[in-house]
Image: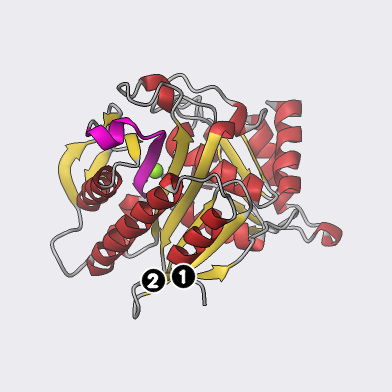
């Protein structure tokens, strides 16, 4: 059995020039994930469910656990000084860590501390999504907005934690994707899914079909394709939508499938955030052999212009995403 801590150290040893900063940063995320996991497991018992009565920068109601997870990850990232700043879905501006140690760090972290948090009250899986970049400004100077507005292909590492029927941490540093399942009896994440690969073709499609009337024609055509009868291609496909991105993504990564959050008539860029949700999962899916697109172009090639920017999102098995893109090109 290999624990996540051992795995991080082992991988660092493969790179003699590595300074250990990234390893230490990943260890901080691992620690915060355990603390957040403990709280989520208690939801329903302690007074930690429900809303705090305030909204985040996107005007969405903040749940108590959103705020808690944001504070825990922020504290863990700041404590050891391996990160010079953090941007979070829950905060309007990026946060600069200004201790002497932090200011000289070369990494920034972008995070959705608790994705799908509206599902907590009903005991459905939620997740944390994180993304790590090397800063572009000079270490030692204050961190800048430009350090956070980098295209996804510049990511150094990315991952997610899914707090589900078991809790898992899945991450990549650009050399494949590995998954670790949390064993609460020993308090460790243990390597359970080595070198994860997403099937090129799948049978699951995940989309909030209640919004059908608002979808672009290309998406409507793709949904029709998914629902047609054709034995050779195993259609009709199966619809699965948890409404918790990390869980939907995780299932499709393991089984093969496509997740779509398209534009809508009132939301030209869809709902999901490029920096906190789409880019990190795009890095993971590409590392696993899959694809992530906004319907027309590679997600990780989009140059961000704002911290909380949204984008339509098509992610999963390569052949499924490519078919959806072809229909988008033809009809949308
Ligand atoms: P959140 O970051 O506010 O939790 O929103 C993101 C979530 C995703 O987890 C999920 O896939 C999506 O919103 C569901 O949206 P909808 O309810 O519109 O289908
Ligand atoms: Mg989210």
Pinpoint residue 287: horizontal percent, then vertical percent: 64, 48
User: In the displayed structure, does residue 296 sit left or right of residue 96?
Assistant: right
Q: The magenta stretch spans which residues?
A: 99-115
- Disc 2 from disc 1: Cα separation: 6 Å
Q: Please name the colour scheme applied to the rendered image.
A: secondary structure
Q: Return the disc, 2 or 1, that comes first in the chain's sequence.
A: 1
Q: Are marks 2 and 1 in contact (CB under 8 Å)?
A: yes
Q: Which residue appears farthest toward the right when viewing the image?
A: 232
Q: Is residue 105 magenta?
A: yes
Pinpoint residue 242: horizontal percent, then vertical percent: 47, 57
> At 23% across and 43% down in the image, what residue appears?
62
| Residue 297 or residue 177, whichever sits in front | 177
Q: Quadrant of residue 217?
A: top right
Q: Locate the C terminus and report the quarter of the image it occupies.
A: top right
| Residue 47 or residue 191, whichever sits in front | 191
| Residue 192 or residue 80, whichever sits in front | 80
- Is residue 215 at least partly visible in the picture? no
Q: Is residue 112 above or below residue 198?
A: above
Q: Quadrant of residue 203?
A: bottom right
Q: For ligand 2, give the image quadrant.
A: top left
The residue beneath circle 1 is 3
């Amino acid at each position: 059995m290999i624990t996540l801590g051992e795995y991080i150290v082992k991988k660092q040893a493969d790179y003699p020039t590595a300074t250990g900063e990234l390893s230490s940063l990943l260890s901080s995320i691992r620690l915060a994930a355990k603390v957040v996991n403990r709280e989520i497991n208690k939801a329903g018992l302690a007074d930690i469910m429900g809303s705090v009565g305030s909204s985040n920068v996107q005007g969405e109601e903040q749940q108590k656990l959103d705020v808690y997870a944001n504070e825990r990850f922020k504290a863990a990232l700041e404590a050891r000084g391996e990160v010079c700043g953090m941007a979070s879905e829950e905060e309007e501006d990026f946060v600069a860590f200004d201790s002497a140690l932090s200011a000289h760090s070369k990494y920034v972290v972008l995070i959705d501390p608790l994705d799908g948090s509206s599902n907590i009250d009903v005991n459905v899986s939620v997740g944390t999504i994180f993304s790590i970049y090397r800063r572009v400004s000079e270490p030692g100077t204050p961190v800048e907005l430009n350090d956070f507005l980098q295209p996804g292909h510049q990511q150094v590492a990315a991952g997610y934690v899914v707090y589900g029927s078991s809790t898992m941490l899945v991450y990549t540093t650009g050399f494949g994707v590995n998954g670790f399942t949390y064993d609460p009896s020993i308090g460790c994440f243990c390597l359970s899914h080595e070198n994860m690969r997403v099937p090129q073709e799948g049978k699951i499609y995940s989309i909030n079909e209640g919004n059908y009337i608002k979808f672009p024609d290309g998406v409507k055509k793709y949904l029709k394709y998914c629902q047609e009868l054709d034995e050779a291609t195993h259609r009709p496909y199966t619809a699965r939508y948890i409404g918790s991105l990390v869980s939907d993504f995780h299932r499709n990564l393991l089984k093969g499938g496509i997740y779509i959050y398209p534009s809508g008539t009132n939301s030209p860029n869809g709902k999901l955030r490029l920096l906190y949700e789409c880019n990190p999962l795009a890095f993971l899916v590409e590392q696993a052999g899959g694809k992530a697109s906004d319907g027309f172009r590679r997600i990780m090639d989009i140059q961000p212009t704002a911290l909380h920017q949204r984008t339509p999102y098509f992610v999963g098995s390569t052949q499924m995403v490519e078919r959806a893109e072809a229909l988008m090109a033809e009809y949308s």
